[in-house]
Image (cartoon, rainbow, N blue to C red):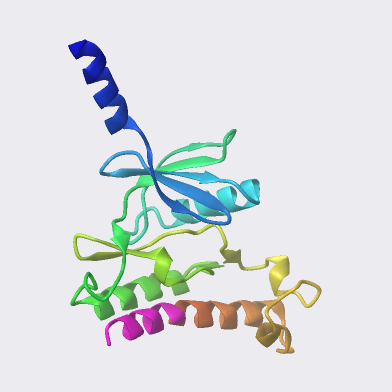
């Protein structure tokens, strides 16, 4: 009887806890330090982009660390990066952290395209960016006039390289704006 109760209790503690459910993925907390992200829509594309970006940024300390990935099930195990940022947990040195993050991002051949409040986390007064599955890479068809683009980008009569740089600057500048609004 005691053994059965202990087994039941252990199963409860080992159970994954869903912490996010979105259009493209579901995220589960599997321990105090690990999450599991399961891709559910555009699985191969989003999964591949996420892994590629995490590998590129693997030496940086503002993104989750890639621990394991499963190509068959489109699942990634990563380090837990804390809770979503808000006005209460906004670090005092957020401006310095964001400038460093923007500098690193602006050196990449991709755009962190999904910079939204829910994709910015804080753990131990440190800011983390999460969710790299929607990123755009230099040379993507997205930047050609034949591809569906936001109207503001399509209006620009520029080559793909210039559109990429403008899009990147606009998206990465959004990070600073979001936190400025939060800090008011």
**Foreground residue among 35 and 51:** 35
What residue is at 59 percent from the left and 33 percent from the top?
Answer: 72
Farthest residue, direction right: 146
Point out residue 87 in the picture as x, y percentages from the top left corner.
26, 76
Q: Does the image show residue 66? A: no
**Foreground residue among 45 and 58:** 45
Q: Does the image show residue 92? A: yes
Instruction: Tell me if 15 is positioned left or right of 91 in this view.
Output: right
Q: How many callouts does the rendering have?
A: 0
Q: Name which quarter of the figure residue 167 lies in.
A: bottom right
Work out which quarter of the rendered image holds the N terminus and state it.
top left
In the rendered view, would you say 62 is above or below 160?
above
Point out residue 148 in the picture as x, y percentages from the top left corner.
75, 73
Work out which quarter of the rendered image holds the C terminus and state it.
bottom left
Farthest residue, direction front: 1
Q: Name which quarter of the figure residue 67 lies in.
A: top left
Instruction: Tell me if 5 is positioned left or right of 117 in this view.
Output: left
What residue is at 64 percent from the left and 82 percent from the top?
Answer: 162
**Foreground residue among 3 and 142:** 3
Point out residue 166 in the picture as x, y percentages from the top left corner.
58, 83
In the rendered view, would you say 161 is above or below 20?
below
Point out residue 86 in the picture as x, y percentages from the top left corner.
29, 72
What residue is at 26 percent from the left and 25 percent from the top?
Answer: 10
What residue is at 41 percent from the left and 71 percent from the top?
Answer: 117
The answer to if 84 sits in the magenta stretch is no
Mostly what secondary structure, the magenta segment?
helix
The residue segment tinted magenta is: 174-184
């Amino acid at each position: 009887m005691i053994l059965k109760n202990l087994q039941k209790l252990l199963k409860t503690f080992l159970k994954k806890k869903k912490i996010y459910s979105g259009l493209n993925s579901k995220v589960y907390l599997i321990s105090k330090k690990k999450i599991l992200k399961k891709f559910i829509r555009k699985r191969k594309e989003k999964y591949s982009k996420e892994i590629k970006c995490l590998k590129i940024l693997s030496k940086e300390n503002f993104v989750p660390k890639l621990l394991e990935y499963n190509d068959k099930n489109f699942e990634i195990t990563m380090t837990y990066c804390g809770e979503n940022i808000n006005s209460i947990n906004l670090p005092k040195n957020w401006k310095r952290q964001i400038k460093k993050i923007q500098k690193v991002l602006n050196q990449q051949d991709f755009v962190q395209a999904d910079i939204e409040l829910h994709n910015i986390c804080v753990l131990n007064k440190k800011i983390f960016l999460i969710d790299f599955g929607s990123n755009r890479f230099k040379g993507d068809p997205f930047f050609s006039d034949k591809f569906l683009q936001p109207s503001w980008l399509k209006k620009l009569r520029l080559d793909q390289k210039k559109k990429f740089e403008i899009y990147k600057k606009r998206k990465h500048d959004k990070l600073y704006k979001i936190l400025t609004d939060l800090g008011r």
